[in-house]
Amino acid sequence: MVTAIVTTDPVFGPWNIPSRGQNMIMNFYAQSKGIPVDTIIPEPLFSKSLTTTRWVKKNKGLDRVLLCSIHQLTVEVTEELIRDLSDVEVHFCLEDLSGKGGQFLEGVFSELKAFQETGVIPYESLESYQELRSLLDEDGGSRSAGAGKPDGVEEL
Protein backbone atom coordinates (compact mmCIF):
# COMPACT_ATOMS: atom_id res chain seq x y z
CA MET A 1 0.00 0.00 0.00
CA VAL A 2 1.51 3.35 -1.09
CA THR A 3 1.01 6.18 1.42
CA ALA A 4 1.73 9.85 0.80
CA ILE A 5 1.88 12.88 3.04
CA VAL A 6 0.52 15.93 1.18
CA THR A 7 1.66 19.43 2.11
CA THR A 8 -0.11 22.56 0.87
CA ASP A 9 -0.04 26.33 1.37
CA PRO A 10 0.80 27.28 4.96
CA VAL A 11 -2.46 29.23 5.43
CA PHE A 12 -5.63 27.14 5.31
CA GLY A 13 -8.84 27.60 7.27
CA PRO A 14 -8.01 28.83 10.77
CA TRP A 15 -4.46 27.44 10.54
CA ASN A 16 -1.10 28.88 9.53
CA ILE A 17 1.23 25.88 9.44
CA PRO A 18 4.39 25.90 7.30
CA SER A 19 5.30 22.77 5.34
CA ARG A 20 7.78 21.59 7.97
CA GLY A 21 5.05 21.82 10.62
CA GLN A 22 2.58 20.00 8.37
CA ASN A 23 5.15 17.24 7.85
CA MET A 24 5.73 16.98 11.60
CA ILE A 25 1.99 16.76 12.37
CA MET A 26 1.32 14.16 9.67
CA ASN A 27 4.38 12.05 10.51
CA PHE A 28 3.36 11.98 14.18
CA TYR A 29 -0.20 11.01 13.19
CA ALA A 30 1.11 8.27 10.88
CA GLN A 31 3.46 6.92 13.54
CA SER A 32 0.75 6.90 16.22
CA LYS A 33 -1.66 5.05 13.88
CA GLY A 34 1.00 2.62 12.62
CA ILE A 35 0.82 3.94 9.06
CA PRO A 36 4.07 3.64 7.06
CA VAL A 37 4.76 6.72 4.89
CA ASP A 38 6.30 6.18 1.46
CA THR A 39 6.47 9.66 -0.03
CA ILE A 40 5.78 13.35 0.46
CA ILE A 41 3.84 15.30 -2.16
CA PRO A 42 4.27 19.08 -2.00
CA GLU A 43 1.27 20.69 -3.70
CA PRO A 44 2.15 23.93 -5.55
CA LEU A 45 1.42 27.30 -3.99
CA PHE A 46 -2.27 28.30 -4.33
CA SER A 47 -3.27 24.78 -5.41
CA LYS A 48 -6.73 23.99 -4.08
CA SER A 49 -7.68 20.87 -6.01
CA LEU A 50 -4.81 18.52 -5.09
CA THR A 51 -3.67 18.46 -8.72
CA THR A 52 -0.24 17.00 -8.00
CA THR A 53 -1.67 14.35 -5.67
CA ARG A 54 -4.20 13.30 -8.31
CA TRP A 55 -1.43 13.16 -10.94
CA VAL A 56 0.74 10.95 -8.69
CA LYS A 57 -2.20 8.64 -8.03
CA LYS A 58 -2.94 8.31 -11.74
CA ASN A 59 0.65 7.82 -12.90
CA LYS A 60 2.47 6.20 -9.98
CA GLY A 61 -0.28 4.65 -7.85
CA LEU A 62 -1.45 5.87 -4.48
CA ASP A 63 -3.56 4.04 -1.91
CA ARG A 64 -3.53 6.34 1.12
CA VAL A 65 -3.19 10.13 1.55
CA LEU A 66 -2.57 12.10 4.73
CA LEU A 67 -3.53 15.79 4.92
CA CYS A 68 -3.21 18.06 7.95
CA SER A 69 -6.80 19.28 7.85
CA ILE A 70 -10.02 19.25 5.87
CA HIS A 71 -9.42 22.99 5.46
CA GLN A 72 -6.74 22.17 2.89
CA LEU A 73 -9.54 21.31 0.47
CA THR A 74 -11.60 23.88 -1.37
CA VAL A 75 -15.33 24.15 -0.74
CA GLU A 76 -16.11 23.82 -4.42
CA VAL A 77 -16.87 20.14 -4.65
CA THR A 78 -15.67 18.87 -7.96
CA GLU A 79 -16.93 15.55 -9.17
CA GLU A 80 -13.53 15.09 -10.82
CA LEU A 81 -11.71 15.35 -7.47
CA ILE A 82 -14.15 12.96 -5.79
CA ARG A 83 -13.90 10.52 -8.70
CA ASP A 84 -10.09 10.63 -8.75
CA LEU A 85 -9.73 10.03 -5.01
CA SER A 86 -12.75 7.78 -4.39
CA ASP A 87 -10.58 4.66 -4.09
CA VAL A 88 -7.95 6.35 -1.91
CA GLU A 89 -8.02 6.16 1.88
CA VAL A 90 -7.87 9.80 3.06
CA HIS A 91 -6.79 10.90 6.55
CA PHE A 92 -7.24 14.41 8.00
CA CYS A 93 -4.82 14.48 10.92
CA LEU A 94 -5.95 17.51 12.96
CA GLU A 95 -9.58 16.38 12.85
CA ASP A 96 -8.60 12.71 13.39
CA LEU A 97 -10.93 11.86 10.54
CA SER A 98 -10.38 9.17 7.94
CA GLY A 99 -12.32 7.23 5.36
CA LYS A 100 -12.57 6.11 1.80
CA GLY A 101 -15.02 6.52 -1.06
CA GLY A 102 -17.14 9.13 -2.74
CA GLN A 103 -19.71 9.29 0.06
CA PHE A 104 -16.96 9.92 2.62
CA LEU A 105 -15.47 12.74 0.51
CA GLU A 106 -18.89 14.33 -0.06
CA GLY A 107 -19.42 14.26 3.71
CA VAL A 108 -16.04 15.92 4.25
CA PHE A 109 -16.91 18.66 1.77
CA SER A 110 -20.25 19.12 3.56
CA GLU A 111 -18.47 19.47 6.92
CA LEU A 112 -15.95 21.89 5.40
CA LYS A 113 -18.77 24.06 4.06
CA ALA A 114 -20.45 24.08 7.49
CA PHE A 115 -17.17 25.20 9.11
CA GLN A 116 -16.76 28.04 6.63
CA GLU A 117 -20.34 29.25 7.10
CA THR A 118 -20.01 29.36 10.89
CA GLY A 119 -19.14 32.76 12.34
CA VAL A 120 -16.46 33.46 14.88
CA ILE A 121 -17.58 33.37 18.50
CA PRO A 122 -17.02 36.82 20.09
CA TYR A 123 -15.16 35.44 23.11
CA GLU A 124 -13.01 38.52 23.89
CA SER A 125 -15.69 40.03 26.16
CA LEU A 126 -16.44 36.77 27.99
CA GLU A 127 -15.03 36.17 31.45
CA SER A 128 -16.02 32.56 32.14
CA TYR A 129 -16.93 29.24 30.58
CA GLN A 130 -20.47 29.73 31.90
CA GLU A 131 -20.80 32.93 29.81
CA LEU A 132 -19.52 31.04 26.77
CA ARG A 133 -22.03 28.23 27.37
CA SER A 134 -24.84 30.78 27.71
CA LEU A 135 -23.79 32.44 24.46
CA LEU A 136 -23.84 29.07 22.68
CA ASP A 137 -27.23 28.21 24.21
CA GLU A 138 -28.67 31.56 23.04
CA ASP A 139 -27.43 30.77 19.55
CA GLY A 140 -29.47 27.58 19.58
CA GLY A 141 -26.35 25.42 19.62
CA SER A 142 -25.63 26.04 15.95
CA ARG A 143 -22.03 26.88 16.79
CA SER A 144 -21.44 24.26 19.42
CA ALA A 145 -19.27 21.28 18.71
CA GLY A 146 -20.26 17.71 19.21
CA ALA A 147 -23.06 17.55 16.68
CA GLY A 148 -21.48 14.38 15.35
CA LYS A 149 -19.96 13.55 12.00
CA PRO A 150 -21.85 14.46 8.83
CA ASP A 151 -23.55 11.78 6.75
CA GLY A 152 -21.07 9.56 4.98
CA VAL A 153 -18.20 10.37 7.38
CA GLU A 154 -17.06 7.37 9.36
CA GLU A 155 -13.84 6.32 10.94
CA LEU A 156 -11.96 3.37 9.43
Image: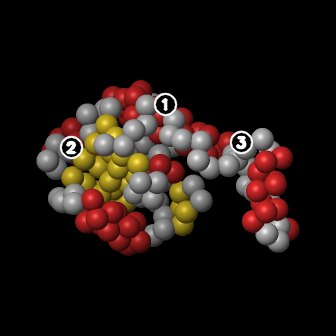
Q: Nearer the viewer, residue 148 or 88?
A: 148
Q: Is residue 39 above or below residue 151?
A: below
Q: Is residue 23 left or right of residue 124?
A: left
Q: For the residues marked 2 and 3, what is the alpha-carbon distance in whole angstroms? A: 36 Å
| Label 3 crowd (10 A; few <14 / some 14-19 / many >=20) | few
Residue visible at 14% across and 47% down? Answer: 1
| Label 2 crowd (10 A; few <14 / some 14-19 / many >=20) | some
Q: Is residue 26 above or below residue 118?
A: below
Q: Is residue 144 above or below residue 130?
A: above
Amino acid type at circle 2 is Asp
- Mark number, residue 63: 2
Mark 1 and mark 2 lie on one chain; the one further toward the N terminus is 2
Numbered disc in front, either 2 or 3: 3
Amino acid type at circle 1 is Asp
The quarter in which the C terminus is drawn is top left
Using the rendered image of the protein, determine whether residue 84 is visible from the camera's viewpoint: no
Amino acid type at circle 3 is Ser
Q: Secondary structure at mark 2?
A: loop
Residue visible at 79% across and 63% down? Answer: 130
Mark 3 and mark 1 lie on one chain; the one further toward the N terminus is 3
- Mark number, residue 151: 1
Q: For the residues marked 3 and 1, what is the alpha-carbon distance in whole angstroms? A: 17 Å
Q: Tell me residue 143's x, y (percent).
A: 70, 47
Q: Tell me residue 24's x, y (percent).
A: 35, 71
Residue under label 3: 142
Q: Tell me residue 59's x, y (percent).
A: 17, 41
Mark 2 and mark 3 lie on one chain; the one further toward the N terminus is 2
Cβ–Cβ under 8 Å for marks 3 and 1: no
- Mark number, residue 84: none
Residue 82: image quadrant is top left
Q: Nearer the viewer, residue 34 or 18?
A: 34
| Residue located farthest toward the front when viewing the structure as drawn | 130
